[in-house]
Image: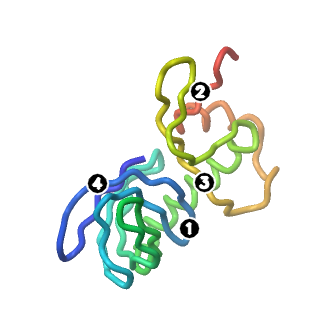
Amino acid sequence: MWVAWKSSAQTTTSRAEVMGLGGLFLQAAKTPSDGSTIDLIFDLPTGQVRGRAIVRNSKPGKGMGIQFVQMKPEDRAKLHRFLSAAEQVSAQIPVTAPAAKLRAGKLAAPRLRILPVCARGTGSSRFRPETRKRLGFASRGK
């Protein structure tokens, strides 16, 4: 998933590697320093989310861990719905975030790792096919 973000020194987009209710890890070659504030925006199947975050762990050349510090309640709700649905799907389909891997001679894009937001097994199985479709995790050959 791509996240657009803006700091005092730059405006760019980065791929989110890990996502949770508290924040993200964004891949970025050039990162703001720890403690910097960034504004961000990203699209989820549940809607567009905007917020403000603080850089908590900057690793130039690799990326940065950011903590959400300001988000409208409706945006927080969209994020929570997305993460809850993704967690239900991940019980069925492995979701990992390592660097791209070589599969069958082709380079596969890295997947987004979802951090848990609720207890597993709390969803109805009738929603799983729709959730898979919305999240783009179509089951291969099934």
Q: Earlier in the sequence, mark 3 or mark 2?
A: 3
Secondary structure at badge 2 equals loop
Comparing labels 1 and 4, the label whose residue is closer to the camera: 4
Q: Earlier in the sequence, mark 3 or mark 1?
A: 1
Identify residue type, mark 3: Ile
Residues packed near mark 2 inside 10 Å, few (<14), some (14 to 19) or many (20 plus): some
Q: Earlier in the sequence, mark 1 or mark 4?
A: 4
Secondary structure at badge 3 equals strand
Q: Which residue is mark 3?
A: 114
Secondary structure at badge 1 equals loop
Question: Image point 53% across, 28% down: which residue?
Answer: 102
Q: Earlier in the sequence, mark 3 or mark 4?
A: 4
Q: Which residue is mark 2?
A: 138
| Nearer to me, 54 or 101 | 101
Q: Which residue is mark 4?
A: 13
- Mark 3–mark 2 Cα distance, whole angstroms, equals 17 Å
- Please indicate whether residue 15 sits to the left or right of residue 142 in the image: left
